[in-house]
Image: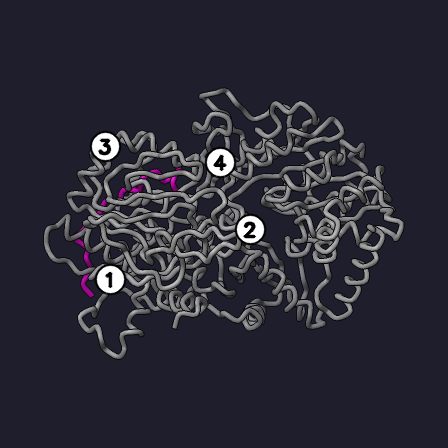
Amino acid sequence: MIHNTKYNLVIGWLYPELMSTYGDRGNIIVLQKRCEWRGIKVEIKLLDLEFKINELKMCDLIFMGGAQDQQQKIVAYDLLKKREALKEMIEDGIPGLYICGAYQFLGKYYREADGKIIKGLNILDLYTENPGPDEPRLIGNIAISPCHPELVSGSHTKGDSDLRQNDNEQALVGFENHGGRTYLGKSVKPLGKVIKGYGNNGDLPAIPDGKSWQAGDETEGAVYKNSFGTYLHGPILPKNPQFTDLLIKIALEKKYNKNIVPNPLDDSLEKCAKKSILQKMKIK
Amino acid sequence: MNLLLILLGKLLSAFSRLLNLGSGSTWPGHIALSINPNFIKQILKHNPKLKIILIAGTNGKTTTAKLIRTILKKNNYRVFQNEGGANLLNGIASSMLLHSNVLCTLNYDYTIFEIDENTLPLILKEIADPNFIILLNLFRDQLDRYGEINTIASKWREALKKLNSATTLILNADDPQITYLGLHLKGATVKYFGINPANGINKAQHASDSTYCPNCGRKLAYDSAYFSHLGNWHCDNCGLKHPQKTFTSSPIYPLFGDYNKYNTNAAVLLAKEIGFSNEKIISSLKDFKPAFGRQEILNVYGKKIQIFLSKNPTSLNESLKTIVRLNAKNLLLVLNDRIPDGRDVSWIWDADTEEYISKFKNILISGDRAFDMALRLKYSSKAQNSNVKSQNYSSKFKIIENLEEAVFDALIATLKDEILYILPTYSAMLDVRKILTGKKIL
């Protein structure tokens, strides 16, 4: 097998100390291993509070996870100062994965349960609102059907009788846990369509006292250029290796300016894990 | 009316056990509270001499409770306790109901209640002046159920403000959030415990939760960190720091592991506050047997099994660290995602499995989310080992989803003079015990 040994990648991990509450560092572990197994050298840059902008600019791939509210506020203060650099990279197509709180923060604003508005980075065309302290958090296993063409291999065969089977192998699975509901603007696309779960602004059953939250639009996450925002913890990448490899591929192609196909790896265990959770969710 | 509730509850509970519907540890209390919401308050008012000990915290409640119960019982005090896991209001009401006589009298000197993190503020509304409250720690645990630890800490803070001088608070000095709870309290007396570990490290581990100052929100500095965010901490910004007068030296440590040093020091500090001498504490604890599933040793088919409940990143790290020190060779990991475990299994990625996984000879993985745990291990090979072969997990560990098969397979792989170490989540621990003890092999 030919390895991609001549390549190397710098992965920037934004606020590993503060924004790493829900096992999201698993995404970094998986990105690193899947590069190393292919002989791609990886450097993980830890971009903690008060990191230097030129460190961020050296990165070929950006990752940022979610955290507790108190910690997100500390991060917001620091990151707003570096907004221009991050925006430039995102506009330039530097790939990135932004989970939960990080995803919300890329948008225009976050309206807290008490109505207070927290300014976002305003890089992605989306906003998030918490419907109030009495509305439930959206918590549970989630499966989505991805919209990104490279995550839908064989999308050209739509209409085939095996489509259903294909759909499931392509499904992205994870665990969501968020109070905010996110609404997408016109210049971003959803990451996927909800198969089961809540997604961006989930449809909840009517609450007995008559006040029910508006029906969701069945979207999950957002894609803008090569930046991906999502509510999927789990963490998302271990059980969705096709997504991990897409991030690696985009990062390599962007850096080396040519078509690069990452060598295939043995994903039988990952497939079993995905199949097992889909079965638990009774998705056939 | 409470008399009727007690009779009804006892009857229902007896039925429940007779029909094997479970031990009836929560729903008699549930019924009592729904008929009389003041049930707990009224029964306690009727028993003013009963001394009450409340224990809360993410890890160590059951072991600490058992240590205290053992000391009290060995010294001829009459003690009752809520059943393990029944640590919400209904479990506490049940426990009171089942231990009182028909005159609503509790013929006991002490009661010990393990309290769920979310229930502590509620129980303090019912029990306004407990004699002791032990607060052990706050770790990330079941974010889907409890929410984030800052939220829990602030709810605790509000609830503790109302305490009066009848209460002694026993707080973990090494946990910044817990220490902070004891500051500026007007009513209760506050005592601190901690540990003196042999090898503190200088940086908090990944599973750390509150490395930020609970007072001003800035990053804390650690002179030494013991595990997770526990250690000798201080804040350079606002000057908040680890309390100086801290109890760290029990005369006896009956269990392995740094985390059990915390449990022991908490229990022993309480015993000393009651007035027990070192000699009495040593003689009470020298034959101490661990609580079920917490380092509990079982013998099955002439083979030794030791169970280490591992339910969140910190407890999994500590279990692995402890059994590696014990030179463990055979490991069975069981990961479930039922309600008592937390539905979200992402926490396994916050545990540092990389550190320990190469030390074992046989690793078997089971449970509802066996494949998630298997992936965690697949991606746990050392970072510098970039050989493609390291992706070949099958030679390193085995996956058997069915727990019963897994347990017996692991037993077969364990040699006569070896120990099988089982690290389960909570519901998995109950299932493992049922498999091992329910077969009348014990």
Is residue B164 toward the left or the right of residue B214 in the image?
Answer: right
Q: Which residues are magenta?
A: A1-19
Q: Is residue B421 above or below residue B63?
A: below
Give the letter of the chain under mark 4. Answer: B
Q: Is residue B53 left or right of residue A121?
A: right
**Element at label 2:** helix
Kindly report the distance in space between the C-alpha atoms of the residues bearing marks 4 and 3: 27 Å
* Image mark for residue A53: 3
**Residue B442 image position (x, y, % from top left):** 72, 68
Sequence order check, earlier mark of 1 and 3: 3
Q: Residue at x 15, y 53 (%)?
A: A253
Q: Which residue is mark 2?
A: B319
Q: Main secondary structure of the magenta part?
A: loop
Q: Secondary structure at mark 3?
A: helix
Contact, mark 4 vs mark 2 (Cβ under 8 Å): no
* Protein chain holding label 2: B
User: Dot 3 falls on which chain?
Assistant: A
Residue at numbered disc 1: A151
CA gap, disc 1 and disc 3:
32 Å
Tag nearer the camera, 2 or 1: 1
Residue occupied by mark 4: B210
Of circles 1 and 3, the one toward us is 1
- Point 21% across, 72% down: residue: A158
